[in-house]
Amino acid sequence: RQAKLAERPLAGKRIVVTAGGTVERIDPVRFISNDSSGKMGFAIAKAAQRLGAEVMIVAGSTQVSPPPEIPVTTVTSAQEMYEALTAVWEETDILVKAAAVADYRPKETARHKIKKSDEAFVLELVKNIDILESLGKQKTHQFLIGFAAETDELEKHAMDKLKRKNCDLLVANDVTAEGAGFGSDTNVVNIYDASGLVQSIPRMAKEEVALRIMELAAARLAGSRQ
Ligand code: CTP
Ligand code: CA
């Protein structure tokens, strides 16, 4: 029984993983979005399931297919992603926010294709809801794992986001580092908690990085420190 517990430390936990990028429509043929292949989020979902959790994926736009064995809710915009998450919020034990959410959306979505003219085109953008920050404020028992892709001052930005969004852990990566970031099959990340750096994970397969992250979350949830 002890061995079982060690192998499946997330048994009985409900985990929601967001993956991919949100898409904000300009018109029926155009949109703005963010880089995100979906690979890291899907790897997290698989790792969580392997550790015994009941997993659900909320996916935006991705380049790869989600793992077939895990239920997926597909969303388009940040607003839709927020609604999908609030619908399951009460029953969520761990939320992993690996998705790249568009910070802004077009003020208006044109119903018909916008035609070009000789004039310069100005697109007005309005701010999207910060899903993680908003859910962080509504946290009761949920364990929140945020992500941050940065190009500079990794620790400063990571700690700022962790605190602002009330995360329990924040996984940060420098997208300019070799073998890290978008589309890559590997990643290099630092994991932070409120007290600072907890773990530096050198370059390894995203599956392996995902397992380390979920093992750390499991250990934290079990009340032990690692
Ligand atoms: N996030 C979110 N809702 C948003 C923007 C971001 O839930 N509207 C989440 C992301 O899913 C990620 C974390 O917040 O887990 C950090 O995202 P990031 O874009 O790095 O942070 P921002 O606060 O948007 O800061 P900036 O883009 O200015 O670096
Ligand atoms: Ca952002």
Image: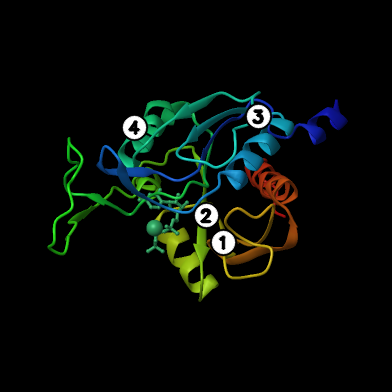
Query: Quick check: marks 3 and 1 in contact, CB under 8 Å?
Result: no
Q: Give me the C-alpha separation between circle 1 and circle 4.
A: 25 Å
Q: Is residue 81 left or right of residue 202?
A: left
- Real-space Cα distance between discs 4 and 2? 20 Å
Q: How far apart in space, not on screen, are marks 3 and 1 (Cα)?
A: 23 Å
Looking at the picture, tell me which residue is in the foreground, 112 or 140.
112
- The amino acid beneath tag 1 is Ala
Q: Which residue is mark 3?
A: 53
Q: Amino acid at mark 4?
A: Glu
Q: Is mark 1 within 8 Å of ligand 1?
A: no
**Closer to the eye: label 3 or 1:** 1
| x then y, percent, for residue 153 | 51, 76
Callout 3, which amino acid?
Ala
Density class for disc 4 (Cα within 10 Å; few <14, some 14-19, many ≥20) is some
The residue positioned 45% from the left and 29% from the top of the image is 74
Q: Please report contact status of discs 1 and 2: CB closer than 8 Å, yes or no.
A: yes
Name which residue lies at 81% across and 34% down: 7
In the rendered view of the protein, which quadrant contains the C terminus?
bottom right
Closer to the chain start, of discs 3 and 4, is 3
Earlier sequence position, callout 4 versus callout 2: 4
**Dot 2 surroundings within 10 Å: few (below 14), some, or many (20 or more)?**
many
CB-based contact (under 8 Å), mark 1 and mark 4: no
Q: Which residue is mark 4?
A: 83
Name the residue carrying label 1. 172
x and y percentages locating residue 118 in the rendered image: 13, 61
